[in-house]
Image (tube, rainbow, N blue to C red):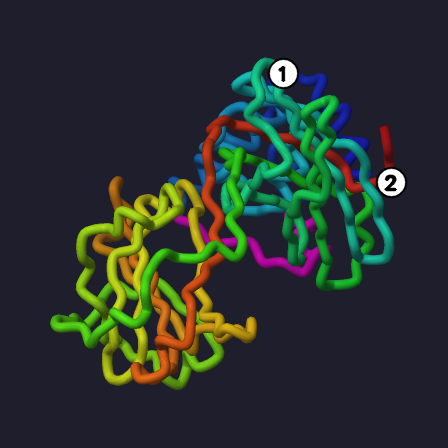
Amino acid sequence: MFREQYNGLNKQVSPDESLLKDTILKAQKIEKKYGKKMYSFRKPAIAFVSVCLCLSLAMPALAATVEPIYELMYMVSPTVAQFFTPIRKSDEDNGIKMEIVSTYIHDNVAEIYVSMHDLTEERIDETTDLYDSYSINRPFESSAHCERVGYDENTKTATFLITIDEWGNKDITGDKITFTVREFLSHKQTYDDIEIPISLTTVDVAEKTQRASNITGGGGTNYKLFHQKNPVALIPSLPMKEFPIDGIDLTGIGYIDSELHIQIAITDNLDNDNHGFFYLQDKDGNKIDNSYSFNFVNQYDQPGRITFCNYVFDVPQSEISNYTLYGNFVTSGMKTKGDWKITFPLENQSQ
């Protein structure tokens, strides 16, 4: 019923005060339907939101074209923001077109296929990765994620699957979502089982160490057991010239407290997503993974940030000569920025 009235309101250039109040009242009823509370704001913010709603009634495309207005509306009420956002099933920016391919709604799950096609160059390939640059705005509580599921070499088109699981077992058919992409990585290089040209028989105890700070993460089977607030780490040295991976530097290897430590450095990894890990292998092909790893940075959120990744192996120094060092790595060759945004209803459809 509200959607039908909205279509009529679109034709009006300037809604009067009573129309605005009536619209806000209906929006509040929608909030109650979805079991969400309206946020409480001070009067200036409420006045500004009212202006945003009034403008979006007069010009429905405004919320989609003026990002601050849309973001403010979404912060106040995702239901209202999505309701007023015009449907736009394709978008083109920087010579790249993003488009809805098909949607499938079943039970409380929505599956949406989205394609990205480079119209002018060859920036999209089979390695295209949206990593953390996308957002999925929807008017209901849910979990959502996106992954690449296909690539067409003939048309240079990558296809992604958005999966949304609604938490309240509500009927989401007809609701709109907005999918936004700000940038993507492509032309990635994958290096599997690369032998590292280091003679482990020459590895000795580290002469100098440091307490690492600015910890950003870690992993491994024994991470919780060995990880400390400021773990002991190698002091980075000049990069190894013979290291075979461009975009990743080997900055240290040595023993600390009877454990083998290996350290690599990656510059601006939040922009290039370069990463990797090491393993040891004996003459019979048996592999040993690191016991734990931890990462720390030289600075936060500034250009030129270096992430130091430290891998620790529980292998005695007296036995290390029985192993060879290998690694698996991924590096990105291209980063493309843009502003792609599509809004569409959740309903079964296909091209």
Q: Total marks drawn?
A: 2
Q: 202 or 79, which is in the foreground?
A: 202
- The numbered mark at residue 119 is 1
Q: Could you tell me which quadrant the N terminus lies in?
A: top right
Left or right of 72? Residue 243 is left
127 is higher (above) or lower (below) than 234: above
Q: Name which residue lies at 46% across and 31% down.
A: 334
- Comparing 85 with 234, the one in front is 234
Q: CA distance from mark 1 to mark 2?
A: 28 Å
What secondary structure is found at the residue carrying circle 2? loop
Image: 62 above or below 158 = above
- Camera-side mark, 1 or 2: 1
Q: Is residue 19 visible?
A: no
Q: Name the residue carrying label 2.
A: 348
Up-down: is 209 above or below 39? below
Name the residue: 25% across, 69% down. Answer: 202
- Few, some or many C-alpha atoms within 10 Å of disc 1 (few <14, some 14-19, many ≥20)? some
Q: Residues within 10 Å of mark 2 (few under 14, many from 20)?
A: some
Q: Which mark is residue 44?
A: none
Q: Which residue range is magenta in the image? A: 28-42
Query: Is 168 drawn above or below residue 47 in the view shown?
Result: below
The answer to if 197 sits in the magenta stretch is no
**Looking at the picture, which amino acid does disc 2 mark?**
Asn
Residue 297 screen position, x and y as percent: 27, 57
Identify the element where label 1 is drawn. Answer: loop
The quadrant of the rendering that contains the C terminus is: top right
